[in-house]
Structure formats: structure tokens, C-alpha cells
Amino acid sequence: MKVESYVLLFVGFFFGCVGLAYWFLSSEDAGSVMLLGTFLLGSVPGFYYLWWSRRMRPRPEDDPNASLEDGAGVVGAFPGSSIWPFVLGFGATFVALALVFGAWTLGVGLFLAVAALVGVIYESRRGGLV
Amino acid sequence: MTILADRPAAFDESPALEHAQAPSGFLKWVTSTDHKVIGKNYTVTAVIFFLLAGCMAMLIRAQLANPDSTLLSQHTYNEMFTMHGSLMIYLFVGPVAFGGLANYVVPLQIGAPDMAFPRLNALSYWLYLGGGSLMMMGFLTTGSAADFGWVAYAPLSNSINTPGAGPDLWIVALILTGFSAIFTGVNLVSTIYYLRAPGMTMFRMPIFTWNMLVTGILILIAFPVFTSALVMLWCDRHLGAHIFEVQGGGVPVLWQDLFWFFGHPEVYILALPFFGIVTDIIAVFSRKPIFGYRGMVFATISIAALSTSVWAHHMFTTGVVLLPFFSLMSYLIAVPTGIKFFNWIGTMWRGSVKFDTPMLFCIGFLGTFLVGGVTGILLASPPIDFATHDTYFVVAHFHSVVMALVMGAFAGFFYWYPKMTGRMLREGLGKATFWFMFIGTNVTFDPQYLLGLKGSPRRVAEYAASEGFTTLNRISSAGAVLLFISVAIFLVNLVVSWRVPIPAGDNPWDASSLEWATSSPPPHHNFLKIPPIRSQRPVWDQNHPEHRILEHAKPRFGGLLANAGGSTVLLEDLSADGDEGAEGPGSDDYGGTGGPVL
């Protein structure tokens, strides 16, 4: 996990320095705020990973001498085919249409989106199709 | 990533039986959460947008082939260049890289069974398709499609200057595709951080995967800013928010600030994946390890970091930006990019280079990107930028860059098509595609540098015969015809390979990264068996045990050491009992490092 955290910490470090320099040189608000946001985007998860990497054993993927057997076990749960991302995407598109043409597509869009969210949650509990 | 101690019952059944029941055809397109299917969907959809945008470019070039042309009305011309730019940038070059090729290839390259969040991945695709469709719907509205340029500068983009549903559709479409990109970025970073195979340490990942990690982080930095700026613009147009309007106390130039904070990293979100593709392909077709692997990784990270601190170099002529800061930062990007060029050449140097189609496209990429990059350094200088801002010089500069990326996309497509389909594309037609594209790119865009220096403004539908732009514009339009022919040959190639297949086998290029260890196309969840990962080139080690790179080889008395691709290679064992321990690579395959090396 160490290298992963260093990548993010570098993002935080770099934009911290650039943000400070930019603020003192320009006093421009918008750019400084965006650089501050970028600093946080790197440093918050970066320090979290660093904190964790000191408290866990190296994972098999961090160990250059690991064999495949070291990674035996459950890798993760990968859902099978699911109609719900399509329904959610369709619903979101209808919601977006409502922003252009007025409210009548909003109902359709929200209905599809909520149905999809419910569907996804139930599918996660039951397990979906392949 | 969800880690379940006990899987739901549905997953515990015999996998072969379940997968036989997997949907096919239309239902597969709509329901699949397999990263390979989604990657292909993305690629095909992006290529369709590419063809549409290409047709718009042909109309633009037809309009400009003659002075005082009346082929397109000025209004239609505005629509054409706006939608050409929007489709190419937002819906083709980016999505084909991080949604298409990366989605397909990254899990395979790190030995993962799928992306970390498969359903989120599918949602990304549907948001992208929905957004793209909404943007194209603009042509069906009574007003017109968006016509304020792909950058939508305020106050041109407000509801008085560009009223109607077309521009609104453009805005909400990009909000949707923005979310799609953010989800893909989250997915890429999580997949690379959490789903690598045992032994696949960060510094053993192929450069393409490294670049996609950095691209993913860059997406997370840039896209939220753009999406929020679009929401603000929508509020301005519909709710009277006056964020970008002077009348209500707003600041129009704020739009440029927000847009380019996204827009400049976006250029590198487009570029970095293709840098990665080119790096991997050059190494495979030079039959050598990558020269300076760690240098490549650090250069990628530096480019990404610097790219987010140069956004206002697009705004030099507004007069409100800090010129020295942004100029210096823009110049600095040349350093890591130069390192990359050095390493690409170093990888080819004294390798046994095979000029197959993917490699040709990579070399075309190098040449074209160099032209675009060097003219970019010119534009980083404020005095030159003041003189050339909004002229065809800028158009030529970024088309050199983007056409290089398109060549990178074709390189990746020709390289991974056998893995995706199990069939080869035809070499002869592929080489014809390359030469038409390479020559066409230069014939189209090199005259535009001269046009820009003569003062031809961009985004203007007509020019008078007396202005002296006619000849150069005609040459440029002729070049566009060559580009059209090259894409037509590519489509013929696809049809031929589909009708008369040539089986590809698992590893047609004798490549070295993990995706070539599995079958073509790979099975559900990618791998039946993963080779041991002991270096950056696990498949090479497996297929060429006599030429293994041994990462942990210790220097012995009399041995010569060289650092090749971040791995310590024992080149020549000069000690008498050199038959045990590390084996040196043969000088045929390691021509660049064979012989006396220091």
C-alpha cells in the first residue's frame, strides 16, 4: 500500500506548494480554491493509505516475491449481468432532459432512477444473474 | 471494492453452467457488467462519434476550400465547428481511451477478474451514451445544435446570445458524460490499487496501466470542476443566477478560469493513455524492455501534476492572469515530455524493430506529437501567444497534438484488436491507413500554421479572395480528403477481417504483458491461469525462459551490470563459472544493451 499512498501524497504535496505560490503571487480566489481542493484530494486519502499501510501486513500484490497461492481466497464479489445500470442511466438521461424541456420528463426519469436503485440493492442481497 | 466473506448462493454454482446461460445479442449489450463487453461498447460508440465528427470536419473543409464560399450558412458553420470539437474531445478521444481501451485492457494487464465496480462501470457507459445522444439531439431542435464553440465562453453562452434548446442539451449532455468520466476514474484507480494479482507490484505494472492510474487521478481532479461550472452555466441560463454575467455582478472571465482548470488537464487526460499505449507498443516491436521504466513513470506523474498548474495559459490575452507563473509552468512540461521522447527513442535504439502497423502508428505519433509539442512551447511564450491567439496557428497546434493521439488510438486498436476479437486485421490495409493518415495529417494541418502566421482567424466561416488565404486552404482541404480515405480504408479493413477471419492466437505480437497470457478473446473473468509474475514482463519470462530478466540478480565478480527498464540485468558473465545463477540475455534480443555497456 506504500507506493499507492506516495502517489497520492505527491499530488497533495505538489499542489500544496503550487497553491501557496499561486496564492501569494496572484491573490486570485478561484484558482487558489481549486488548487486547495486538489491538495485535499491528494493528501486526505494519501495520509489515510499511509496510516493503513503501517498497520497492515503487505498484501500479496505488494510483495515482489509473492506466489499466486499467496493470493488464494475470495478476490471480491463481482456482480453478474444486471439491467439496473441501464435503467439508472436511462433515468438520469430523462432527468437531464427535464432540465432542458421542462418538468414532464422529470417524473419518468425519477421513477426509473428510483426503481433502478431499489433493484440494485435487492440484487446485491440476492445475487443477480450471471 | 466489496469483499464478501460468503458469496450469495448464485455465485457458488458451477461457473461453466452459469455462463452458458449468460445473455447474448441485444440483451448482452444492455445488461452486461463484464469490463470487456463494456470496453467494446465504449470503443464502438466512440468510433461512431468519431465518424460523425469527421463528417462535420469534411463539411468545414469543403466550406473553406473556396473564398467567399456559401456552401454552409454562417450559423451552420458555427454549429459544425462546435459539434466537431465537442464530439471529438468529449465523446471520442477521451472515452475511447479511458472507457474503451483502458476498460478492456487494464484489468487484463494487472491480472484482475474485472473492474472493481462492474455495475458502476456499466452505468458509466449508459451515462456516456445518454449524454452523447442528448448532444446530438441538438440537431433535431427547432433552433440549432450548440454553436458557441466547444469551450462555450461566457457571455456568448448565455441565454440571450445563444438561446434555444440545442445549447441547453449540450450543457446537460456534458453534465452526464462528466459523471460518466468521474465514475470511470474512480473505477480505474480502485481497480489498480486493489485488484492486482500477487507479485504485480506497482513498479511491475505496464506503463499503460501506470498512465491510466495517473489519468484516473487527473479525471478526479479536473472533471468535478467542469461539471460544477456547467451547473452554474445552466443556472445562469434558466434561473438568472448571473454568475458569469456582468449585469448581475458576475464575472464572465470566471467561466474561462473554471473551464480551463478542467480543459488543460483534459488535454492530458486525452494524451496520457496514448503515451502509455505507445510506450508498450514500442517496447514490444523493438523486442527490448522499456528504456528507463521508472523515468517514464515519474515523467507521467510530473506531466500530470504540471498540467493542472498551467490552465490560464489559454487566457494570456484576457490580461488578468499571472503571465510569468503560467508561462514558466507551461515551459516546464517540456522537460518530462522530453524525457519520454528520449526514452521512446532509447527503447528503439539498437532494438530489432519490426515495422508492423501498430509500430508504424507509434512512429507517426512521435513525429506528429513532436510538431504539436514544439509549437506548444512557442505558444507558452506570452508575446508569441498574443500575436497568434485565435488564429489558425493555434488550430494547427492542437490538431497536430490531437491527430497524434488519434494515431495512438489506431496503434492501440490495431495492437489489441486480436486480443478483443481473436482475429487479425490485415497488415496491408493497415499500412495504407497509416500512410494516408500520416501524410493527410501533415498536408491538412501544416499549411494551417502558415495561415495562422498570415493572420487567418479561427472560427470564421468565410474569407475574401484578396486576403491571400486561398491556396493554403485548398491544400489543407485536399489533406482532409486523404484523412477521409484513410478512415475509409480502416473501415474496409474491419469488414474484411470480419468476413474472412485470420485467427490471431493468444499472443500474435510476442508481447510481454499479462493480457497476452490469456486466450483471445479472454474468458469470463479473464484468466484460467496466471503465469508467475517476477518482473515487468511476466509473459516474456514465461515464453522466453532463456532470455529472462532477473530483477533480483546480484552483481557478481566480473559481471557487467546495466540498468534496463528499472530491472537489474546481468549482461555478460565474465567469470569462469558463469553457468549458474542469473542468465544473461542474448545479444540478439537485447541489441541495445548487448556488448560493452556502462
Image (cartoon, coloured by chain):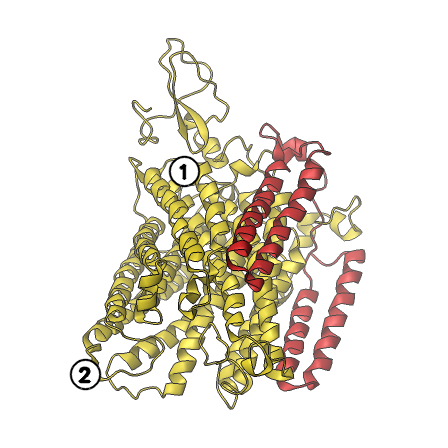
Chain colours: A red, B yellow
**Are both tags, 2 and 1, on one chain?**
yes
* A70, A17: nearer the viewer: A17
* B240, B197: nearer the viewer: B240
**Image coordinates for residue B558, horizontal then vertical, percent:** 38, 12
Query: Can you see residue A93?
Result: yes
Disc 2 element: helix
Q: Residue furthest top?
A: B576
**The residue under label 1 is which amino acid type?**
Ile
Disc 1 element: loop
Q: Is residue A58 above or below residue B258?
A: above
Q: Is residue A51 above or below residue B457?
A: above
Chain name for mark 2: B
**Image coordinates for residue B391, horizontal then vertical, percent:** 32, 71
> Which label sits on residue B269?
none
Chain name for mark 1: B
**Image coordinates for residue B442, horizontal then vertical, percent:** 26, 62
Sooner in the amino-acid sequence: mark 2 or mark 1: 1
| Residue under label 1 | B290
Q: Which quarter of the rendering shows the C terminus of chain B?
A: top left
Q: Residue at x 51, y 66 (%)?
A: B257
**Image coordinates for residue B426, horizontal then vertical, percent:** 34, 56
Q: Residues within 10 Å of mark 2 (few under 14, many from 20)?
A: few
Q: Residue at x 55, y 56 (%)?
A: A23
Q: Residue at x 34, y 53 (%)?
A: B361
Query: Distance of mark 2 from mark 1, alpha carbons?
Result: 53 Å
- Quarter of the image for residue B72 reads bottom left
| Residue under label 2 | B466
